[in-house]
Image (cartoon, helix red, strand yellow):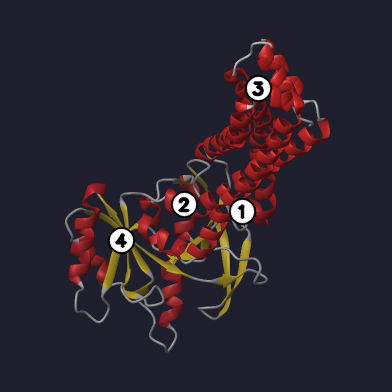
Amino acid sequence: MHALKLILRNALRHKIRTGLTVFGLFVAVLAYGLLQTVIDAWYAGAAAASKTRLITRSSISLAFTLPISYEARIKGVEGVTTVARSTWFGGIYKEPKNFFPQFAVSGNYLDLYGEFLLPDAERQAWMRDRRGALIGRQLANQYGFKVGDVIPLRGSIYQGEWQFVVRGIFDGADDTKITRHMLFHWEYLNEWLAQRPARRANQTGVFIVGIDAPERAADVSRKVDGLFENSVAETLTETETAFQLAFVAMSNEIIAAIRVVSYVVILIILAVMANTMAMSARERTAEYATLKALGFGPGFIALLLFGESLAICAVGGGAGLWATPHAAAAFKQTAGSIFPIFAVSQATVIAQALCAATVGVTAAIVPAVQAARVRIVEGLRAVG
């Protein structure tokens, strides 16, 4: 109890210095948490991917399409349960800044995506309307789309003015599911292509392949690609997770930079905290010598410094932990179009707490050792 009183009094002896140190820790822990959450948001699509879905695409590039005749042959592979088509549309809603993904999909697409919840009535309405579209809840909330609205899109890949009617709004099964995209009928796009001289009809961007067991992913992938080996349009089949991570890999340098910055922030506050504790120990050299003269051992002296350092880190780090989810929610309101999923994970919270504790312990090691070793005579002569 006496040690705790001494720790608190020592921590509050220089209120301005302690307050600034606490504020620095608060900012550092908060910044670290937000930066780690940005990284998690980048990987959100891959994290939500299903282990029973494979993606079959052109082995050359996603820019090359595959003939729909491949679909029947893929269905014949042992372990395959469902095959759906999906083509990236790339339309512009009003102006280029209003970017959101649009996919032309086959009617069985939602059978493979059980995490998207859509009322049966709305699905039936979509199936009956060739210009019908399904909108994710996040996208609907962002632009205020409602069932029955007409969405005009200006084609960038498929030139022309397109209009789609919202026939349904689907929700995610939980908060980790991204629903910021639009789906419409692949047949509608294919009809348009069939009327053009470029002969781009009866092609699809990718096949989504449902399999009966996750452990068969490698075997099914190998068999599917083997079907089209040495053909004019060879395929590459991979898990949905690997497919999503391929897009994340394009931003590896950015993600690496964010990781580095998040740890640099912690290293900077560690240096600040170490300097604060060193100053505190130097100012109290005579006091520590007096405590030794009264019979207190080196361990008690070290305890005072470690306790003070950990107390400061607990307050600053605790405030940063409390503020992180609130700051993340505010950030999502302004940057939801970039990161549809932006939530602080439990792993990030644990990492923040460990960083704060590490700073508290590490910053006090050198000052505590020096204070514990101070000689009584030399300490009493010291001037703080």
Identify residue for label 3: 304
Amino acid type at mark 3: Leu
Disc 2 to disc 4, C-alpha distance: 29 Å
Left or right: 23 as drawn, with respect to 306: right
Q: Nearer the viewer, mark 4 or mark 1?
A: 4
Q: Residues within 10 Å of mark 4 (few under 14, many from 20)?
A: many
Amino acid type at mark 4: Glu
Q: Quadrant of the C terminus?
A: top right
Camera-side residue of 295 and 191: 295
For the point 18% across and 60% down, the residue is 77
Disc 4 to disc 1, C-alpha distance: 31 Å
Residue 349 image-quadrant placement: top right
Q: Residues within 10 Å of mark 2 (few under 14, many from 20)?
A: some
Q: Is residue 183 above or below residue 328?
A: below
For the point 36% across and 51% down, the residue is 111
Disc 1 to disc 3, C-alpha distance: 57 Å
Tag 4, which secondary structure?
strand
Disc 2 to disc 3, C-alpha distance: 67 Å
Identify residue for label 4: 238
Identify residue for label 2: 123
Tag 2, which secondary structure?
helix
Disc 2 to disc 1, C-alpha distance: 16 Å
Evaluate whether residue 322 shows in this view.
Answer: yes
Q: Which mark is residue 186?
A: none
Identify residue for label 1: 140
Which mark is first along the chain, 1 or 4? Answer: 1
Left or right: 15 as drawn, with respect to 103: right
Evaluate whether residue 179 shows in this view.
Answer: no
Amino acid type at mark 1: Ala
> Seen from this angle, which residue lies furthest front?
377
Left or right: 383 as drawn, with respect to 371: right
Residue 269 position, x and y percent, is 66, 44
